[in-house]
Image: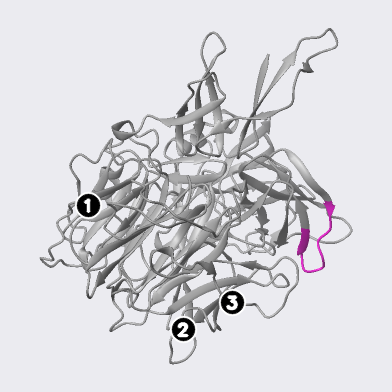
């Protein structure tokens, strides 16, 4: 009997003999020869002979019964097409005009091309993303600097044109050196001007951003964001391709406490502007749910995860998002103050409902629309890449949308767009290689879309017996009973109720926390125990609740008279109750690709929490990875915070880290995502390549 084993990088084989006492190894483990690392699976024939090997490079065949594996299925088959995280470039003028391209891949290396992709030269090992080229156009590569992230070891690098002379990027310091500090990735906003975040381990609830005006040589603190920053910053209006007349505005996606009504992680949006003064940088929210914002979707790759947001380089307030909370494409023309539904684009993304707007996996929402980009040289041209429905485009600023011919079924999983100053657009895909698209880019002018803001539903009180609804205008006057109280979910929705006869015995919520308030808005001890369930239940066969669930309207609260249900309250936004504590957790590692704590097997990360209960009569905090308890008996300090170090011993993959506590009848928890990865060779070396197509 032959047993095959992969350690995440290599594949091994060993022969075992059957003995009465059990299998006994007949030889040592032997490393098998493969022209690509990072194995995932082996396929066997009906006679037990190994036939196919899957790695992140593609599909391999074996000519010798499994001792050697060779990539196969290239060309139009696409089984060895690169998983490209990003493509960008530089238009080079001067004595020899040409188009440089840079790509980061998962399988493996970052590559540079000096002839528009016809050939590929130097490569930096291994996986790569967040590649930026300064400046976007230059004569003879004058003052060119290329920055990005390279994994295995996931370090920030800087290099010259074509990845020449790579070295470590000069990260900013947070002015101390305790364990638990984290460094984010550098992003270009203007020529020689970069923004980069750090997290001070002693103040883990705040992300500090630093500005360099000289290519990273010197840094000054610019602003703070009191949240976990997720994904990469998105600069607009006065950015690298349009340096005047505006100062840049920078949009950051951030992790919010709790979940959506369907149990997915909440990703919000924050704007930073006035970066160069006069006066202080202005940081403001662009994600008020009362204005029609729900939650951003995520496009995941192995290391880098991207929030699905499109920003207009020419206008500081023009945004497009994939809102996974409501299942709609939305647009803002005022910097996120209000949001409008783009129904035609939503219908085109889903092909009239043939595709789901998003899928949920591991507590994260992955939308069908994966990447949105404005042409920086013509704001009227906008592209939207979908997972399976091709590339959608508009040439009139979004007044009309259409699918670009022949892209559906060919360019699946698009990951980024690169717009050179003129000509075809380059498209990277995660598993289908690199493409060009002849998008019409002539600027015929367009009118910025302006439409009515999203109408937010409710709050409505539903009679649990008749289904009759009443608009609530004053929560101090609940209607059915003078002593009724509200049980309200914050940052989530009620997904089920349990009864014993007419007595309400348990409440289930999708995420966030559950709180009880009297009619004066004073918080009371929770009288009905709660638990968590993302799937909608049967609500004790209550027909009113079942109809509400079918309409996909979030149940934000219930009205109770003691232990009797007196009403359901639905609303499209959070209800106006403010609990004393709102639990929120974040995980931090030394390196935070996309703002996600990322470790290898056996390494440790820091978990920080706030908004938990403290005191002698409350339960301890515990940390779970799935159903496995990592740490228990964690106390919160008098401020409701804690900070602990946790060792992660789980296989490669993304995980939902859950922090929970029981306080009387209240069960509270918050979640975040961490990733366990494997390393390839040590990152950073240049690998000479004659050609790579």
Front: mark 1 or 3: 3
Which residue is labeled 3 in the image? Answer: 172
Q: Residue at x 30, y 44 (%)?
A: 349
**Mark 1 crowdedness (10 Å alpha carbons): few <14, some 14-19, many ≥20:** many
From the top left corner, tell me how far across and down residue 685 is, in percent.
54, 59
Is 354 situated left or right of 49 in this image? left
Query: Of helix, strand and loop, which one carries label 2?
Result: loop
Decide which of tag 2 and tag 1 comes sooner along the chain: 2
Relative height, residue 535 to residue 415 (above, below): above
| Label 1 SS | strand
* The quadrant where residue 515 appears: bottom right
| Viewer-side residue, 524 vs 90 | 90
Query: How dense is the environment of label 2, judged by Cα within 10 Å: few (below 14), some, or many (20 and up)?
Result: few
Is 154 inside the magenta-drawn segment? no
Residue 634 falls inside the magenta stretch: yes
Q: Position of residue 266 (x, y in %)?
A: 53, 54
Query: Is residue 295 among the parts visible in the rendering?
Result: no
Toward the left, the furthest residue is 444
- Please tell me whether mark 3 sits on a helix, a strand or a loop: loop
Residue occupying the far right of the picture = 616
Q: Nearer the viewer, mark 2 or mark 1?
A: 2
Question: Pointer 2: what residue?
Answer: 214
- Image quarter in which the N terminus is found: top right
Q: Residue 342 in the image: x percent, y percent?
A: 28, 53
The span picked out in magenta is: 633-644
Q: Which residue is mark 1?
A: 393
Q: Earlier in the sequence, mark 1 or mark 3?
A: 3
- Mark 3: give few (<14), some (14-19) or many (20+) Cα within 10 Å: many
- The nearer-to-camera label among 3 and 2 is 2
* Residue 675 in view of the camera: yes
N-terminal label among 3 and 2: 3
């Amino acid at each position: 009997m032959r047993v095959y084993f992969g350690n995440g990088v290599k594949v091994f084989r060993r022969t075992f003999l059957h003995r009465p006492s059990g299998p006994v190894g007949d030889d040592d483990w032997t490393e098998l020869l493969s022209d690509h690392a990072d194995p995932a699976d082996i396929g066997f024939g009906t006679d037990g002979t190994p036939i196919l090997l899957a790695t992140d490079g593609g599909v391999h065949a074996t000519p010798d019964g499994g001792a050697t594996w060779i990539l196969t299925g290239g060309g139009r088959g696409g089984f060895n097409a690169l998983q490209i995280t990003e493509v960008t470039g530089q238009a080079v003028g001067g004595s020899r005009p040409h188009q440089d391209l840079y790509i980061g891949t998962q399988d493996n290396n970052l590559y540079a091309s000096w002839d528009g992709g016809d050939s590929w030269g130097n490569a930096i090992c291994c996986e790569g993303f967040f590649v930026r080229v300064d400046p976007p156009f230059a004569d003879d590569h004058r003052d060119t600097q290329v920055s990005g992230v390279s994994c295995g070891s996931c370090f920030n690098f800087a290099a010259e044109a074509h990845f020449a002379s790579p070295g470590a990027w000069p990260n900013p310091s947070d002015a101390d050196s305790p364990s638990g500090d984290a460094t984010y990735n550098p992003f270009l906003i203007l020529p020689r001007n970069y923004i980069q975040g750090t997290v001070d381990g002693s103040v883990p609830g705040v992300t500090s951003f630093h500005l360099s005006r000289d290519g990273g040589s010197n840094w000054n603190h610019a602003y703070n964001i009191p949240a976990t920053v997720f994904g990469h910053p998105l600069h607009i209006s006065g950015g690298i391709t349009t340096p005047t007349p505006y100062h840049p505005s920078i949009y950051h996606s951030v992790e919010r406490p709790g979940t959506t009504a369907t149990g997915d992680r909440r990703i919000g949006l924050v704007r930073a502007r006035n970066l160069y003064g006069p006066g202080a940088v202005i940081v403001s929210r662009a994600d008020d749910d009362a204005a029609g914002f729900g939650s951003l979707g995520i496009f995941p790759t192995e290391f880098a995860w991207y929030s699905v947001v499109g920003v207009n380089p020419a206008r500081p307030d023009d945004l497009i998002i994939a809102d996974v909370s409501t299942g709609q494409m939305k647009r803002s023309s005022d910097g996120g103050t209000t949001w409008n539904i783009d129904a035609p684009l939503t219908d085109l993304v889903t092909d009239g409902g043939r595709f789901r707007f998003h899928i949920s996996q591991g507590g994260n929402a992955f939308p069908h629309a994966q990447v949105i980009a404005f042409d920086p040289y013509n704001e009227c041209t906008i592209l939207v890449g979908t997972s399976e429905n091709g590339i959608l485009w508009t040439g009139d600023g979004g007044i009309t949308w259409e699918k670009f011919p022949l892209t559906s079924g060919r360019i699946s999983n698009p990951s980024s767009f690169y717009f050179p100053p003129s000509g075809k657009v380059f498209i990277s895909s995660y598993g289908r290689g690199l493409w060009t698209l002849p998008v019409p880019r002539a600027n015929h002018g367009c009118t910025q879309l302006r439409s009515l803001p999203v109408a937010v539903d409710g709050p409505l009180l539903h009679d649990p017996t008749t289904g009759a609804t009443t608009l609530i205008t004053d929560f101090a006057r609940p209607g059915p009973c003078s002593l009724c109280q509200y049980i309200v979910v914050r940052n989530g929705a009620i997904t089920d109720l349990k009864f014993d006869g007419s007595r309400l015995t348990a409440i289930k919520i999708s995420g966030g926390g559950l709180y009880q308030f009297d009619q004066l808005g004073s918080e009371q001890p929770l009288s009905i125990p709660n638990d968590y369930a993302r799937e909608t239940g049967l609500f004790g066969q209550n027909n009113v609740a079942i109809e509400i669930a079918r309409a996909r309207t979030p149940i934000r609260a219930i009205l109770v008279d003691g232990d009797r249900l007196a009403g359901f309250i639905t609303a499209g936004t959070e209800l106006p109750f403010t609990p004393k504590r709102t639990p929120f957790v974040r995980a931090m590692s030394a390196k935070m690709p996309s703002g996600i704590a990322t470790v290898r097997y056996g390494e440790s990360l820091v978990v920080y929490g706030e908004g938990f209960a403290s005191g002698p009569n409350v339960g301890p905090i515990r940390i779970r990875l799935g159903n496995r308890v990592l740490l228990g008996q964690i106390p919160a300090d008098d401020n409701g915070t804690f900070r602990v170090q946790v060792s992660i011993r789980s296989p490669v993959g993304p995980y939902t880290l859950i922090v929970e506590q029981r306080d009387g009848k209240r069960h509270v928890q918050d979640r975040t995502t961490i990733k366990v990865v494997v390393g390839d060779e040590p990152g950073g070396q240049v690998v000479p390549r004659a050609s790579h197509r």
